[in-house]
Image: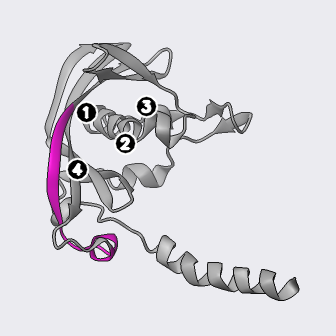
Amino acid sequence: MKRIIMLLVGISMLVLPAAVSANYPMYLNGDRNFIRCDGHMGTAWYVDRTSLVVQKYEPPQYIIAVNVLTARSAIGNEDDFYSGGSGTVTDVRTMHFLYDWDACAMYAWSDAEMDWYYLPPGGSWAETGITMPAGEIAFYLAYRMKFYGRRPQYNEYLKRNVSVFEDAFYVRIP
């Protein structure tokens, strides 16, 4: 039994560096106009800072639209893309975000539902996906202020306040 456990630990130690090195490029093909907001399973998403449009500026409410690009490895090799290789754009979609500063609540527009839906700061990736980090980047680009990152938020699963976005998240936003 002890040997099996040691074998499993050894195998996980070999796999860990590969998982840790899965590091999509911070900027798509080195262009600082395309800022990575997330990456998952061979695909990375980038906020196009040149497309940002403030549609409503009525504090405490704001609406921002921005294009989000989906990219995969330009040469069809995920390992190359993980380690900083070039990417090719496979999709572009415009995302709309509504922010309520006083309530510290971010919403995204759903074309399917024709309504805003709430992005919980402590939500899972399934709930918030690329949308919440894209919305955070858009707000920071527009106003040079953190939105969910400005204060700890209560996490329902952890039953305590946690930082949604660390300072390192904002450092990459030119």
User: Where 61 falls versus 94 (above or below)?
Assistant: above
User: Where 57 falls versus 20 (above or below)?
Assistant: above
Q: Secondary structure at mark 3?
A: loop
Identify which residue, 24 or 15, lies in the foreground: 15
Query: Does residue 117 appear to the left or right of 35 in the view shown?
Result: right
Q: Are marks 2 and 4 in contact (CB under 8 Å)?
A: no
Q: CA distance from mark 1 to mark 3?
A: 11 Å
Q: CA distance from mark 4 to mark 1?
A: 21 Å
What residue is shown with label 1? 142
What residue is shown with label 3? 147
Q: Earlier in the sequence, mark 3 or mark 2?
A: 2
Which residue type carries mark 3? Phe
- Tell me the tag on residue 130: 2
Q: Earlier in the sequence, mark 1 or mark 3?
A: 1
Which residue is drawn at the image coordinates 19% and 52% (left, top)?
34
* Range of magenta residues: 79-94
Q: Residues within 10 Å of mark 1 (few under 14, many from 20)?
A: few
- Tell me the tag on residue 70: 4
Which residue is drawn at the image coordinates 26% and 39% (left, top)?
141
- Report the residue that reaches farthest toward the right: 1
Q: Secondary structure at mark 2?
A: loop
